[in-house]
Image (cartoon, rainbow, N blue to C red):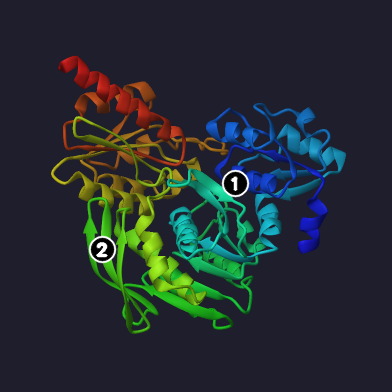
Amino acid sequence: MATRMHSLRGKRIHFIGIGGAGMSGLARIALSEGFNVSGSDAKDSSVVTALRVLGAHIDVTHDAKHVDGSEVVVFSTAITSNNVELARAKELGLEILSRAQLLSILMSESKSIAVAGTHGKTTTSSMMAVALQSCGLDPSFAIGGTITASGSNAHKGTGSLFVAEADESDGSFVEYHPFAAIVTNVEHDHVDFFATPESVVDAFNSFVQTINPQGCLVFCNDDAGSRALGEAHSEISRVSYGTTSGSDLLVDQIELLPMGSRSRVIWRGKSLGKLELRVPGHHNVLNAVSVVAMGLSLDLDANSILEGLGTFQGTGRRFELIGTVHGIRVVDDYGHHPTEIAATLEAARRFAGDGRVIVIFQPHRYSRTKAFITEFAKVLDRADRAVLLEIYAASETAIKGISAQLIVDQMKNGEFIPNFIDATQSLIEDAKPGDVILTLGAGDVSSLAPIIVEGLYKRFSENE
């Protein structure tokens, strides 16, 4: 694999869909490695602008001629097989790599730590990078979200470690062959690719089998899927974490706060002291504890790890406070699976205190909506009010008869308002001081959060 890394030098690498969360991070690292980078995306963005500043040539259209002059073409799972640039690359006989394959090459010269799991990958990867930096290390990292403190989703470090978010959505995480890995949880999702829960388990088993025999697997003892995975792989060193008795890294005395938590961590019977976080939710306590477990497995200083986690301010679109107007808090979150939404709403309820939790939710993908209609309805009913937008298709073709209305039909507090303007205006007019408004979903619903903040400013300034 090191030979492959060497063979890329001096070649022009073209990224199709360069503005995406995962692709932009790899492009950033490739630029840091001195590679000649070009790319294309369907729209301009601050991410595209930043990559241009770093030296990438980027076109904001998809056109076959953009590939001409390239020697290697990289594509993500968001790119369809009939994309004109991908077709041109095949026609020219260029080397074509998936995003996972390129990430594997970029990781190959480092001791890599892959963070996998159905939920929590981005936050846990970000926490891992920050904790390593607190230990005085300068890790490389490639993460599917922006670390709030640094404003970056990727970095080419001078140290020997490389932290990578390992996306299971298409099974391609088997390409990574990491030295060590964290698996936060294992649950059925990405139903467009994984037809059954068993197929998800099979994919994670295949992933664990790629871990270096000298490395380790860190798994969550509180999650049935992750625990079963850990128990099934005696061929490598394993470290368990969680609130469950007998965990190698045990967390207890958990005190959940409106925007953070305090807890105690115990490593194989010995107390390491307090873990204080500035991000909310029980799920984030577990995410942080997985990082402590991995750090200790790498013989890093426990106090430095805990100090680093205490400074962690979160990642973009993970319970991100966008603005506060007249006591109304507007929060944006990426949650798009019922389990993720449950954790986010629990944190939102604590953050709201005596106020209401108001949600504007955009289902992501027709296949996921179809598979989890009842589960979405049950969890969204935990909000005081839930407005649902129409489904964000992503790369999918619409499934006849599948609509967000089907979720609302099974809800008590649900409303289907497919028009963005009508939905936001309804929330702006209804919100009261103390409420938390949550824009929720993996599509473009996040664009509504700043519009709601602006609308609230306008509403209250007119009433003064």
Give neighbour class at mark 1: few <14, some 14-19, many 20+ (Cα, 10 Å).
many
Q: Which mark is residue 25?
A: 1
Q: Which mark is residue 262?
A: 2
Q: Is residue 250 above or below residue 94?
A: below
User: Tag 2's secondary structure?
Assistant: strand
Q: In the visual, does 326 lie left or right of 289?
A: left
Give the percent coordinates (x, y) of residue 65: 79, 28
Q: Is residue 285 above or below residue 269?
A: above
Quadrant of the rendering where the N terminus is positioned: bottom right
Give the percent coordinates (x, y) of residue 81: 70, 40
Give the percent coordinates (x, y) of residue 447: 42, 30
Q: In the visual, does 350 lie left or right of 202?
A: left
Task: Say what amino acid the circle numbered 2 marks.
Answer: Arg
Residue 69, picture quadrant: top right
Q: In the visual, does 444 lie left or right of 154?
A: left
User: Tag 1's secondary structure?
Assistant: helix
